[in-house]
Image (cartoon, helix red, strand yellow):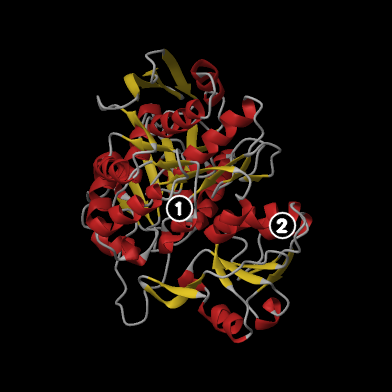
Amino acid sequence: MTEAIPGNPTIEAYTGPLDLSRPHFVGVGGAALSGLARLLAELGHQVSGSDVCDSATLTALRRAGVRVQVGYDEAFIRDASCVVHASVAQIAPVVRAARAAGIPVVQRAQVLDQVAVGRRLVAVAGSHGKSTTAGMLAHILRTLGQDPTYLIGADLTGPESGAHLGRSELLVAEASQRDRSFHFLTPSVAVVTNVTDGKPESSISHADMLREYVTFGCRTAANGVLVVCADCVGAAVAAEVIADERPDLTVLRYGRDRTADVRFLDVCAEGWSASAVVRMPHGAQVRLTLPTPAVHHLDNAAAAMTCAVALGLDPTEVAGAVSTFAGVRRRFEHLDTRAGVTVIDSCAGHPHQIAADLEAARTLALGRVFVVFRPSGHARVGVFGERIGRVLANHADHVLLLDGHDTPPDGHPRVDPTVIVARLREGSYFLPAGPDEAARVITRMAGRGDVVLTMGPDDVTSYSAAILDKLSCPSEVTLSA
């Protein structure tokens, strides 16, 4: 049995019985699927997967018992009980082959929903902040002895990976709004970090997006909990509608707004830390300190703390636990400081994210802020290009602008990154041809106390690696005064 996924004519959602005995994951090397594949392998399923190229992630999956192939071939899915995907647009040939063979094609969330059977699911949704919030909550629960199962769409920077099979009944997972897949979930605790125009490639209106989040919240289990950011207008509006439709739910709001149940009373950032005094629902106040200058991560911490307290944990112990959270890969991740230059990596691509990370970098910098930036998508440059240019011009001293990340769809003209360049100050930007040239520019211009951010899709990490290599070679470094 199937039903159409709105906005995606290439695929229909399978809604029949789901056999997970031999799942095949298409795009298994991606952050959304690799952890789920590893988790199913740990649960004893015969898991296979494929991806376009080999990677360290695929090597790790092989070690975990997942049978992995490079490339996409119909033969790979011949024995599969189902085909699992995270992105409709990338798997059309495999979809056609699976349909021809009578093999169900399912979304990641459908598999997650099956894994959640018999567990209490905490599903973290939102336009931004899902990985950090889910990672913080998983860390809090593990630190306080709960041992949850968790599935996070990124690796953590501490000893934990982005997936873990725990012994308790708790399951913490990201809930993606892509293709409305979070509508397959029935969480005990539903979290909405924010609702913004963060995905221009989805081509839906803000009103439709709000309705999608309302549907997600209304799918919360009977007498469950909804955790929502009070400072985001979209999230607050969605929460009001959900509360009206589901009066059995407990709605907990967090943030700076006076309506917040978990409310920031004081926020500051100094050096490598951000802190706040937080008033909890019953009036108790705790101090929250994070080992990062990224003040916006306090919002993620408040969401995680609200969930943890809703699950029955002590607020003071929760605040202490989250203060030891090492972070999530590529979320304002401190890579190293060499020759006095601090290098930080970020996956930010939306103007709000870019501004937040650059503001955090500015609090650290004793000198200037450099950013090596690659736009993260054709659609995003088309919609946000001018705003991105303004943010870079206002918050960075020097910008190294790279080519866009993807190829535009057939029939669409390529969006020239000069729409971003047009907003930058003359003499403040460079257009390096590759990692080596970018590294030469940085080592020639940067000085002690400066901060360098590499920002954009995952392949930008090759630039941070090249920059750190150059900074490690005294003969290559010409530190400016």
N-term-proximal mark, 2 vs 1 = 2
On residue 61, the disc is 2
Comparing 435 with 274, the one in front is: 274
Q: Quadrant of the C terminus?
A: top left
Residue drawn at (56%, 46%), measured in percent from left and top?
152
The residue mark sitting in front, 2 or 1, is 2
- Residue highlighted by disc 1: 438
Question: Residue flagged by tag 2: what amino acid is it?
Answer: Leu
Which label belongs to residue 27?
A: none
Q: In this orientation, does residue 182 appear?
A: yes
Q: Secondary structure at mark 2?
A: helix
Asked if labels 1 and 2 touch by Cβ distance under 8 angstroms, the answer is: no
Residue 436 in percent (x, y) is at 51, 55
Image quadrant where residue 21 sits: bottom right
72 above or below 174? Answer: below
Q: Position of residue 140 (x, y in %)?
A: 57, 29
